[in-house]
Image (tube, rainbow, N blue to C red):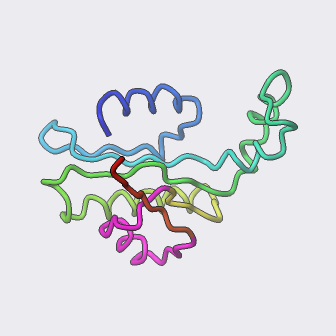
Amino acid sequence: MTNHEFDYLAKDMKMLLDPDFCLVAEYEGKFIGFALAIPDLNQILIKIKKGRLLPFGLFKLLFQRKKINALRIIALGVLEDYRKMGIEACFYGQIIKSYREKNFKMAEASWVLENNELMNRALLQINGVPYKRYRIFEKSL
């Protein structure tokens, strides 16, 4: 992500974040990796009539957050020079630990491209089950 994309994502998700699922890796004070997972709010949003948060949908969202039993891993990345050093495994391990402590039943690593071999291999190694394929097609115009 670019700095601008990171700032935009952080600003929009501040209210949804659980600090146990927002992880940063540093080496000698330098940022080298980041992982972000959020509770799957879609479990509640799907029950809000017409998808309207105002005036009452927002209360439903706030008061039913404890009923959420799924997690969405939104972003996970490590700078190229620091990949394959186990940092990704530490991120996964910490997310799984927090996941179990909070009694979540399911997690989804959404938006992982089909050609992202490192992520896909890591997810398979922790017994992840692929159920969707994401591809980007390109065509010259």
Q: Does the magenta stretch include residue 48?
A: no
- Which residue is found at the position 79% from the left and 36% from the top? 51
- Quarter assignment of residue 85: bottom left
Q: Which residue lies furthest to the front in this view?
A: 141
Query: How many numbered marks does the figure carry?
Result: 0
In this view, the residue in front, 78 or 68, is 78
Q: Is residue 101 above or below residue 141?
A: below
Q: Which residue is drawn at 42% across and 57% down?
A: 136
Left or right: where does residue 39 sit relative to residue 47? left
- Quadrant housing the N terminus: top left
Nearer the observer, 71 or 42: 42
Q: Is residue 12 left or right of residue 62?
A: left
At a point 51% along the width and 57% down the height, the residue shown is 110
Q: Position of residue 127 (x, y in %)?
A: 48, 78
Q: Which of 24 and 97 is in front in this view?
A: 24
Front-lying residue, 134 or 24: 134
Q: In this rendering, is residue 124 above or below 38?
A: below
Which range is magenta? 111-131
Name the residue at 12% across, 54% down. Answer: 81
Residue 115 placement: quadrant: bottom left
- Residue 6 placed where, x, y %? 37, 33
Q: x%, y% of residue 130? A: 52, 73
